[in-house]
Amino acid sequence: MTFGGFLFFMSRNNIYDLIVAGGGAAGFFGAVNYAARKKYAKVLIAEKSQKLLAKVAVSGGGRCNVTHQCFDAAELVKYYPRGGKELLQAFHRFQPRNTVEWFESRGLKLKTETDGRMFPVTDSSQSVIDVLMYEAEKYEVEITTGLNIATIEKENGLFALNAGEEVLHCKNLLIACGGFPKKAGYNFIEEPGIKIIDPVPSLFTFIVEDKALTTLPGISVSEAEVGCSLLKQKFRGPLLITHQGLSGPAILKLSAFGAREFFNAQYVFTLHINWMGGMSEEEIRTILVQLKNTHEKKNAANARPERFSQRLWIYFLMKAGIGEETRWADTGGKQLNKLIALLYRFEVAVNGKNTFKEEFVTAGGVDLKEVDFRSMESKKIPGLYFAGEILNIDGVTGGFNFQSAWTTSWIAAQHMV
Ligand SMILES: Cc1cc2nc3c(=O)[nH]c(=O)nc-3n(C[C@H](O)[C@H](O)[C@H](O)COP(=O)(O)OP(=O)(O)OC[C@H]3O[C@@H](n4cnc5c(N)ncnc54)[C@H](O)[C@@H]3O)c2cc1C
């Protein structure tokens, strides 16, 4: 409130044991796990927007992909382009098995889909929200929306948080504010001296410049291998053609692992695709020669490797200069070589990116060197903790980002107790 031209701040009388900045997955999980173990503690979740657990609500198409059925920590960390190394020890303490137990012991059963993603059996995010809200109520966690933590100061062992017209005080502070698209979003954390890695988007699809290809939307191959000169690694998985370009797990993995390189290249580069799932040139030749010899009298368009739909196969034939009506017997050596080269190392120009079903994750955030992963506490400022997407951690699609939020906030909660 203003008085006599000066700005005065209202101060709540109480000092909180814990204030959690951010009412998302990590914020709620940290708050309720802390409050459950620390009886009579005063805990506040301060959420800047009017909506609690907003991303939980929309994730997984409204079903909330809570975690992934991968119970081996060493295997699990491979799904994190950033943060995997640091998360290894954290997953030894709280991993997907613990997430499943945590929710199931509170009445919410999870089920696993064929690709390993785990969802509530209700197929509704609301069930996850209900459990977290119920726990918060049970342990008397205060929740205030419309409270934007704008600055953080530490005085006499207490944190003083400036939130609009209020100053809040607490002994422990858990920052669980998610990711921000621009570095300015992190100013309130950077000011007290925490290093921030510039944020860039992760998990996106590619816009490609090949009109003949993008006239085949919806067509997919079950296993392709994708890569580009900007990155050493290649990624395998299903590949999907869309109206504007390419998507599917193989592309999403590539986009996540190369998030920074693609940002630096402004999303303009040449994508390489091995349409045969990473087979060698020789293996592809053997398959095509066998196909040709077995189906000499058939049109090349009508005898194809099983993995390709007819429309996609005709697209390759056209590119190799083989007409739809050409019989296998009439294809020449040059055409066959061209076809093999296309399937082995297809090159297509990428010119931009798109979001994947509205899902996005931020690569960047609090530098992991700032944080002690045994406690999630700041190495510089005792009592200050970080959890969830605010950290420079991100996973590929499939429940890995939520798992990181559950794990980091659970560890912070245990240590604060
Ligand atoms: C559409 C969509 C679908 C997704 N699907 C999946 C999926 O299927 N599986 C998966 O694992 N991940 C998925 N993700 C990613 C996942 O939702 C996030 O990684 C996860 O929600 C991060 O949780 P968080 O609590 O760290 O951050 P958030 O959920 O972003 O919560 C942070 C909260 O902090 C608040 N806040 C920010 N600044 C302040 C401040 N200064 N003061 C107070 N409050 C503040 C924000 O308003 C927000 O409510 C999806 C993301 C999106 C956008």
Image: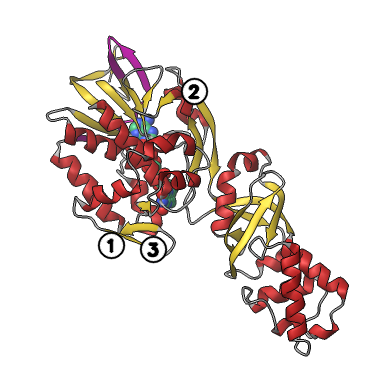
Residue positioned 66% across, 38% down in the render: 264
- Quadrant for ligand 1? top left
Q: Is residue 279 left or right of residue 72?
A: right
Q: Residue at x 29, y 51 (%)?
A: 100
Number of callouts in the render?
A: 3
Q: What is the crowding at mark 2: few (fewer than 14 residues within 10 Å), some, or many (at least 20)?
A: some
| Most common SS among magenta residues | strand
Alpha carbon distance from label 1 to label 2? 40 Å
Vertical position of residue 17 compared to residue 408: above or below = above
Q: What element carries label 2?
A: loop
Is disc 3 placed on a helix, strand or loop? Answer: loop
Residue that badge 3 annotates: 113
- What crowding class fits label 1: few (fewer than 14 Cα within 10 Å), some (14-19), or many (20 or more)? few
- Please provide percent x and percent y for residue 58: 37, 53
- Judge depth for marks 3 and 1 and give the one in front: 3
Q: Residue at x 26, y 33 (%)?
A: 45
Q: What residue span does the magenta drawing correspond to?
A: 141-160
Q: Mark 2 points at which residue?
A: 195
Residue 277 drawn at (x, y percent): 63, 63
